[in-house]
Image (cartoon, grey):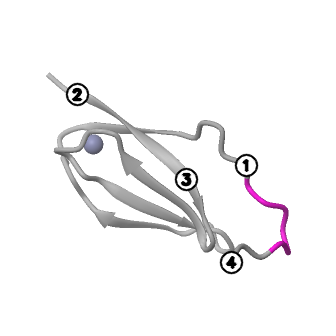
Amino acid sequence: MTSFHRLIGTAEPGGLLFACEIESCGRRLTVDRDSGDLTVIDHGDRAALHRGAIGGVDMPPPGLKQV
Ligand SMILES: [Zn+2]
């Protein structure tokens, strides 16, 4: 049986960071703000299907630097 995990997106200075909400999984990936490249940091549970979700995240307008 395939399990579904939800990835929670948060805005980071360099782009978006997605982390799996399942603690025992630990999948994390980033999406580069400029290039849109997706980089997997931690694979986590490879058997699970991951779906992205961004709740209540405001991306700052281009040119506005976050410190
Ligand atoms: Zn997961």
Q: Any mark on residue 58, and which?
A: 1
Q: For ligand 1, give the image quadrant.
A: top left
Disc 3 is placed on an element classified as strand
| Mark pair 1, 4: CA separation | 15 Å
Residue at 73% x, 55% y is 59
Q: Which residue is mark 3?
A: 10
Asked if labels 2 and 1 touch by Cβ distance under 8 angstroms, the answer is no
Q: Position of residue 60 (x, y in %)?
A: 78, 60
Figure quadrant of residue 63: bottom right
Check disc 4 and give the amino acid type. Answer: Val
Q: Any mark on residue 67, and which?
A: 4
Check disc 1 and give the amino acid type. Answer: Asp
The stretch in magenta equals: 59-64
| Mark pair 3, 2: CA separation | 23 Å
Q: Is residue 64 left or right of residue 45?
A: right
Check disc 2 and give the amino acid type. Answer: Ser
Q: Any mark on residue 3, and which?
A: 2
Q: Which badge, 1 or 4, comes first in the chain's sequence?
A: 1
Asked if labels 1 and 3 touch by Cβ distance under 8 angstroms, the answer is no
Disc 1 is placed on an element classified as loop
**Closer to viewer: mark 3 or mark 2:** 3
| Mark pair 3, 1: CA separation | 9 Å
| Mark pair 4, 2: CA separation | 37 Å
Q: Residues within 10 Å of mark 3 (few under 14, many from 20)?
A: some
